[in-house]
Image (cartoon, rainbow, N blue to C red):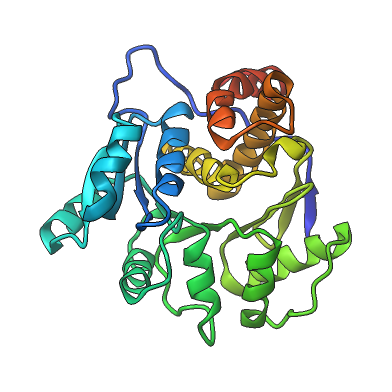
């Protein structure tokens, strides 16, 4: 039986003499002609969460548009040469794949490539949907993954671990996430009201968040927070737990300012800093 976790760990240290290389480099792989905003939101969220450097890998046709929205980002045009791809992935401390990626053959190749990397990896959105079309979870996965499915994506993934009949009761959500984590041997974040985070042995039920999060793009914000914590060498389970707490609290703060009805994903990005302050008050200072 899995064990429930209540107390979360402190945030990673942030020394005063640190520089942009100290605080982690995140690579976000995603985007297509109809989904420019998804990887940009993930990148902006990573910056707001404390990453020192964030690179966005997206199709050449939309890269300049993406960089104009978030000029702090470093760009990588897809498809990339082997030299540029190897350089970007080697430099990254953590990688995100999936936001706005689409499900064409090129996207499938990208997913296979990143799963072979010895890196912390957040798998979200279209990357999850592509994996759910396969007969089984890929063998010999080297990446240390955090999967972030919403209920619909988890329903599709269910056939890979033998659970297609899923309900949204609290007990069944815990069971579903735990079985997926054990089958895939990865961290699973089952999003929704009271998000469940599990490594198959432990589980955490998040207590922050409200309907302010019920907008397109908010999942991309979560991936950026999680990737930054992974890039700063946190244990993947701890990083996922902290990320969902901070994400939910940022949603609450954005909702207080704009009302839950009118809050957007960008508003939540802007509230991340306040959420981190509240996290420190709740769980202690960094160590």
**Is 147 positioned to the left or the right of 211 in the image?**
left
* Residue sitting at the far bottom: 135
On the image, the x and y values in percent for residue 13 come to 48, 23
Closest to the observer, 165 or 141: 165
Residue at screen point 46% across, 27% down: 48
Closest to the observer, 101 or 196: 101
Residue at screen point 73% across, 33% down: 261
Number of dots carrying numbers: 0
Residue at screen point 57% across, 71% down: 184
On the image, the x and y values in percent for residue 73 come to 30, 35
On the image, the x and y values in percent for residue 227 come to 46, 44
Residue at screen point 46% across, 48% down: 38
Name the quarter where the N terminus is drawn: bottom right
Would residue 89 be seen by someone viewing this image from the given angle?
Answer: no
**Is 106 positioned to the left or the right of 155 in the image?**
left
Closest to the observer, 24 or 47: 47
Name the quarter where the C terminus is drawn: top right
Would residue 179 be seen by someone viewing this image from the given angle?
Answer: yes
On the image, the x and y values in percent for residue 103 come to 42, 71
Closest to the observer, 285 or 76: 76
Against 226, residue 201 (above or below) is below
In which quarter of the view is residue 275 placed?
top right
């Amino acid at each position: 039986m899995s064990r429930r976790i209540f107390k979360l760990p402190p945030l990673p240290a942030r020394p005063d003499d640190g520089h942009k290389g100290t605080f982690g480099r995140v690579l976000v792989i995603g985007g297509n002609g109809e989904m420019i905003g998804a990887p940009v939101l993930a990148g902006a969220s990573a910056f707001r969460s404390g990453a020192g450097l964030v690179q966005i890998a997206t199709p050449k046709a939309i890269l300049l548009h993406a960089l104009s929205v978030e000029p702090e980002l470093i760009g990588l045009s897809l498809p990339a040469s082997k030299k540029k791809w190897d350089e970007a992935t080697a430099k990254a401390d953590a990688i995100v794949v999936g936001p706005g990626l689409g499900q064409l053959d090129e996207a499938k190749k990208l997913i296979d490539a990143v799963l072979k990397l010895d890196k912390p990896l957040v798998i979200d959105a279209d990357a999850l949907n592509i994996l759910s079309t396969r007969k089984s979870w890929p063998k010999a996965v080297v990446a240390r993954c955090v999967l972030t499915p919403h209920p619909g994506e988890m329903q599709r993934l269910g056939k890979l671990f033998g659970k297609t009949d899923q309900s949204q009761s609290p007990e069944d959500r815990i069971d579903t996430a735990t079985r997926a984590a054990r089958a895939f041997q990865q961290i699973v974040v089952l999003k929704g009201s009271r998000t469940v985070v599990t490594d198959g042995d432990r589980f955490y039920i998040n207590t922050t968040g409200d309907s302010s999060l019920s907008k397109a793009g908010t999942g991309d914000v979560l991936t950026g927070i999680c990737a930054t914590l992974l890039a700063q060498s946190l244990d993947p389970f701890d990083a996922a737990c902290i990320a969902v707490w901070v994400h939910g609290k940022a949603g609450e703060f954005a909702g207080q300012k704009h009302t839950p009805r009118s809050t957007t994903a960008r508003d939540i990005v802007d509230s991340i800093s306040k959420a981190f302050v509240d996290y420190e008050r709740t769980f202690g200072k960094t160590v």
